[in-house]
Amino acid sequence: MYKTVNSKAFIISCLAIALATVILPTGLVVAQEGPFAGIKEKMASISETERDNLENLFVLGQQIKEMEKEEARITRDIETKNGEIEGLKIAIAGEEIAYSKKLADLKQVLRSYQRMGPGTYLEIILNSDNLAMLLRKINTLRDITRNTGKLMELLEESKVKQLSEKATLAEKVTLIEDNQKQIRESMTKKKQLIEDQERYLASLKEKREYYQDDLANLQMNWDELKNSVPMIIKELSRIIDEGYIPSEKLNISYNFMSIKASVDEKTINEIISGYPSLPKIVFSFYPNRVEISMPEKNLLLSGVFVIQEEHTLKFQVKEGSFYGMPLDSGAIEDLFLKGDLVFNLKLPLSDYTINSIKTTAGNLEWTITPTY
């Protein structure tokens, strides 16, 4: 049944996975050579000691930026919780007013009951002229009793609600205090990192200005990479729509329960090299690991594939480096601030599930389970 599937359509769909998992991370460098040329030449000419010094400064810069992001996040949390606290205070004040009113109503009912006394109620009933009047008076007394009970229930509910809201308020106040403590710690760490950077620069003495200039250029190039991600996503969509891989380069096998396909890294590299809108991209498959490198841009990303939903794959970046300098988790996150690398695999089948995906030495392999 599945052997009759249109070969070209299936091949293009298979290419979608391979291209998506390779191009998006590498697309961080769609921009032209521009600002990279100067720093690239300088990085190639510096000594190992100078490279180590610049790497230390670059890493410190990443850590400082991460602390700044953490401060901003905690500040937003504090502002949100302060707003929630104000809302709770208003709700508690309103509940206290309602409670006082209900309490006053209950006091009035009880005062009337005490003034009349139980004998008066009996007299009212016995003085009825007929059965209809008797029943009406009994119902009236029953309503008074019922209303008294209802008022007491409402008072109890109001009291419980007040206690709950006050407990919630106390929790939020505690969270605010914790957040304020966190931001103080974050600011202390940031200050320490800045002092470390200053001391390190001071230790370089006459070369301080030289390293500051290099660091500024390196940061400028890094910012350029981060800004290019949306362009790569757009380019990826176009490439997937137009992509084609020769059927003889795609290994497909069928059995009663699943369809298995694989493609080698050489084929993918050849396909990508045919798109002039992309920089040179080289990727390598290893057991349980994918490496994507861009030699012209000195960017390397390493990660794994995970199945997010039935038809959706996600590329998780585990490690990265820029000009050979390690990228921390915060810097890697900066590359994908507009969303994770998520890909929907569309195949010409009515219903199916991506059962598994893995990388081996030089190959990308995946298995699809059709729903019969």
Image: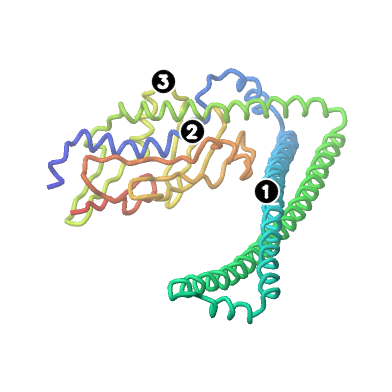
Q: Residue at x 56, y 45 (%)?
A: 319
Is residue 28 depicted above or below 79 in this figure? above
In the rendered image, the quadrant that contains the C terminus is bottom left
Check disc 2 and report the residue beneath it.
26
Q: Amino acid at mark 3?
A: Pro
Q: Amino acid at mark 2?
A: Thr
Residue 317 position, x and y percent, is 52, 44
Which of these two is toward me, 294 or 318? Answer: 318
- Residue at mark 2 to residue at mark 3: CA–CA distance: 14 Å
Marking on residue 310: none
Check disc 3 and report the residue beneath it.
276
Q: Secondary structure at mark 2?
A: helix
In front: label 1 or label 3:
1
* First along the sequence among labels 1 and 2: 2
Badge 2 density bin: few <14, some 14–19, many ≥20, Cα 10 Å: many
Position of residue 29 in the picture relative to residue 217 (left or right): left
Residue 360 can be seen in this image: no
Which of these two is toward me, 69 or 164? Answer: 164
Q: Amino acid at mark 1?
A: Gly
Residue 165 position, x and y percent, is 67, 59
- Residue at mark 1 to residue at mark 2: CA–CA distance: 47 Å
Residue extending furthest front? Answer: 129
Q: Residue at x 82, y 42 (%)?
A: 191
* First along the sequence among labels 2 and 3: 2
Check disc 1 and report the residue beneath it.
87
- The quarter of the picture where residue 63 lies is top right
Badge 1 density bin: few <14, some 14–19, many ≥20, Cα 10 Å: few
* First along the sequence among labels 1 and 3: 1
* Colour pattern of the rendering: rainbow
Is residue 71 depicted above or below 371 in this figure? above
Residue 185 position, x and y percent, is 79, 50
